[in-house]
Amino acid sequence: MRWLIDGYNVIRRDPDLRGAEERGLESGRRALLALVAGAARRSTDRFTVVFDGAPGGAPTGSHGQVETLFSRPPQKADDVLARLAREGREGAVVVTSDRTVADAARRAGCPVVGAEAFVVALSGGGDDDDADDDDEDDRPATRGGNPRRRSREERAARRALDRLRRG
């Protein structure tokens, strides 16, 4: 599985990462990359973190399972994430709380995980309250189906987060 991560969106949704970024953009990027690298060590998944702009002094390129990309003007990180989602399709999970990026990922067929839920899962937290939802059939709901059942996309996102937690 490949995780496509909206770097600054994730940083600005988490208080600890946001605090690191207050010391400088590079500090915020390094804090996020350290969290992602920890998850990569526990997993066989690949992680691509996408940031806007030029890299500055931050690490770039691919380091094992973690790849760092910077958009090149006039492109934005959102454009890069949308392209990667189209290329990855069902084999990728997009991490963002940005509606535009999330909509593009869904159109490409990728599950979307919110930035906050991703950071919680990286820390090994989160809930498994509806783990038995995954055992349900993925047939389209018929009229009068269970209104409490999560959508196919929500179940895919939950499976991805569970995978991340288990490492």
Image (tube, helix red, strand yellow):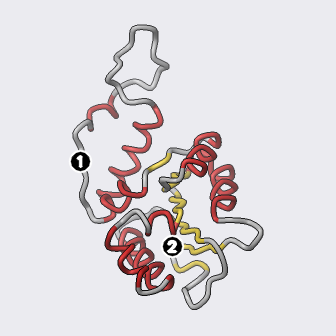
Residue density around tag 2, few if under 14, some if 14–19, many if 20 or more, within 10 Å = many
**Residue 129 percent location from the top left of the image:** 22, 39
- Residue at 42% over, 74% down: 32
Whether residue 136 is situated above or below residue 43 in the rendered picture: above
- Quadrant of the image containing the C terminus: bottom left
Q: Secondary structure at mark 1?
A: loop
The foreground one among 37 and 5 is 5
Determine the residue positioned at 45% across, 64% down: 10
Q: Residue furthest top?
A: 144
Give the secondary structure at mark 2: strand
Sort mark 1 into few (<14), some (14-19) or many (20+) by Cα contacts within 10 Å. some
The residue depicted at 50 percent of the width and 72 percent of the height is 65
Q: Nearer the viewer, mark 1 or mark 2?
A: 1
Question: Which label's residue is closer to the chain start, 1 or 2?
Answer: 2
Which residue is identified by label 2? Answer: 66
List the single residue furthest toward the front. Answer: 22
The residue under label 2 is which amino acid type?
A: Val
- The quadrant holding residue 73 is bottom right
Residue 37 at x, y percent in the picture: 41, 75
| 45 shown above or below 135 | below
Counting every numbered tag in the picture gives 2
* Res 5 visible: yes
Q: What amino acid type should be assigned to the residue bearing mark 1?
A: Asp
- Which mark, by number, is residue 86? none
Q: Can you give x and y, in whole percent of width and height, for residue 124 in the image?
A: 26, 61
Taking depth in this image into account, of 40 and 56 the one nearest to the observer is: 56
Q: Are marks 1 and 2 in contact (CB under 8 Å)?
A: no
Residue at the limit of the structure toward the right, as seen here: 74
Measuring from the top left, give residue 111's x and y in whole percent.
51, 44
Q: Identify residue for label 1.
A: 127
Residue located farthest toward the bottom when viewing the structure as drawn: 57
Q: Is residue 118 left or right of residue 132?
A: right
